[in-house]
């Protein structure tokens, strides 16, 4: 029997709920690693790994590393019918916490958060382009809950996503580039991780969008004071021939 606490869980995704029901229906000793589950279901390894992390966060899974007799390191997964977090909290035998000795501790200033790395800038920014970039960043959490960004982080990263979009990449292609092959360990600073990807994997501009060199500086037309012929110079004066004549007529 599967409890409503799982099937009606307010925080778990539909994939995580279905995966938990499948794992609970398997016999003891069945393989429930990411590759085995990905071979069984059409979802890829990234989505299945994200669902397993959800179940582990809410206490429906427990994964530990163990060494076999041959020296190989394996992961042992234990499925829990009841989430451990609520079970431990409701256990009546739990001993009350021991009183701690109090001491005056000087208050420490909170550490300033480190600034995010710089991201590429688009050559020609527009409100529509930045709005599309912000929508892409806001939707990354649907692929992996670890990529939940604050409004400040999204505002910082939006120009970098806009720089990708102006290189003729679709929003889907940008989303796949940012969420593909994510590490399995927790992301301590997802915004910094995305800023690094936006900079390190920035594709080149299409050939027809390569910025052209600025045109050479052209001086305005001037009328020669000697022969009234037009010539280009930064200020009025004599043309090249008249300057040469002036030099020849000058006494030694």
Image (cartoon, rainbow, N blue to C red):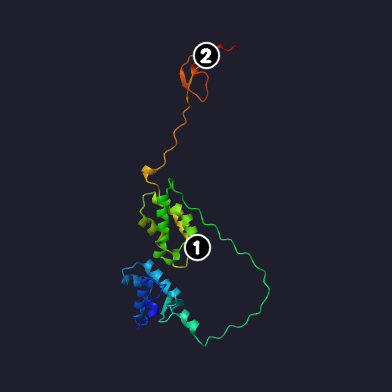
Quarter holding residue 12: bottom left
Q: 131 or 167, which is in the foreground?
A: 131
CA–CA distance in space, label 2 to label 1: 74 Å
Question: Does the image show residue 202?
Answer: no
Q: Nearer the viewer, residue 152 or 93?
A: 152
The quadrant where residue 55 appears: bottom left
The x and y percentages for residue 71 are: 45, 76
Residue 125 pos. (x, y %)? 43, 47
- The quadrant of the picture occupied by the N terminus is bottom left
Relative side of 187 to 101, left or right: left
Apparent side of residue 116 relative to residue 52 in the rendered image (left or right): right
Residue placed farthest to the bottom in the image? 93
Quadrant (top left, top right, bottom left, bottom right) of the C terminus: top right
Q: Secondary structure at mark 1?
A: loop
Residue at 49% over, 19% down:
240
Q: Secondary structure at mark 2?
A: helix
* Dot label at residue 189: 1
Which label was assigned to residue 180?
Answer: none
Residue at coordinates 45% horizontally, 66% vertically from top-left? 146
* x and y percentages locating residue 2 in the rendered image: 36, 81
* One can see residue 51 in this view: yes
Mark closer to the observer (2, 1): 1
Residue tagged by mark 2? 245
Location of residue 158 (image quadrant)? bottom left
First in sequence: mark 2 vs mark 1: 1
Kindly identify the residue that appears in the image at 42 percent across and 50 percent down.
127
Crowd rating for badge 1 (residues with CA inside 10 Å; few <14, some 14–19, many 20+): few
Instruction: Name the foreground residue: 197 vs 102.
Output: 102
Q: Mark 1 and mark 2 in contact (Cβ < 8 Å)?
A: no
Measuring from the top left, give residue 62's x and y in whole percent. 44, 77
């Amino acid at each position: 029997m599967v409890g409503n606490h799982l099937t009606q869980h307010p925080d778990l995704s539909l994939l995580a709920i279905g995966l938990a029901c499948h794992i609970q229906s398997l016999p003891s000793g069945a393989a429930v690693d990411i590759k085995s589950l990905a071979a069984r279901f059409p979802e890829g390894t990234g989505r299945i790994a994200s669902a397993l992390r959800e179940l582990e966060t809410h206490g429906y899974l427990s994964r530990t590393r163990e060494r076999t007799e041959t020296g190989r390191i394996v992961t042992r997964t234990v499925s829990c019918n009841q989430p451990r977090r609520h079970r431990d909290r409701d256990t009546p035998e739990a001993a009350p916490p021991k009183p701690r000795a109090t001491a005056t501790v000087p208050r420490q200033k909170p550490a300033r958060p480190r600034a995010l790395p710089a991201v590429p800038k688009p050559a020609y920014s527009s409100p529509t382009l930045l709005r599309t970039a912000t929508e892409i960043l806001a939707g990354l959490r649907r692929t992996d809950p670890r990529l939940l960004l604050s409004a400040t982080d999204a505002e910082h990263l939006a120009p970098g996503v806009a720089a990708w979009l102006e290189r003729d990449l679709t929003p889907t292609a940008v989303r796949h580039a940012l969420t593909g092959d994510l590490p399995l360990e927790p992301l301590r600073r997802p915004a910094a991780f995305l800023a690094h990807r936006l900079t390190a994997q920035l594709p080149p501009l299409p050939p027809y969008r390569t910025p052209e060199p600025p045109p050479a500086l052209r001086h305005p037309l001037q009328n020669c004071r000697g022969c009234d012929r037009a010539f280009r110079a930064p200020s009025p004066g004599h043309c090249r021939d008249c300057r040469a004549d002036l030099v020849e007529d000058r006494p030694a």
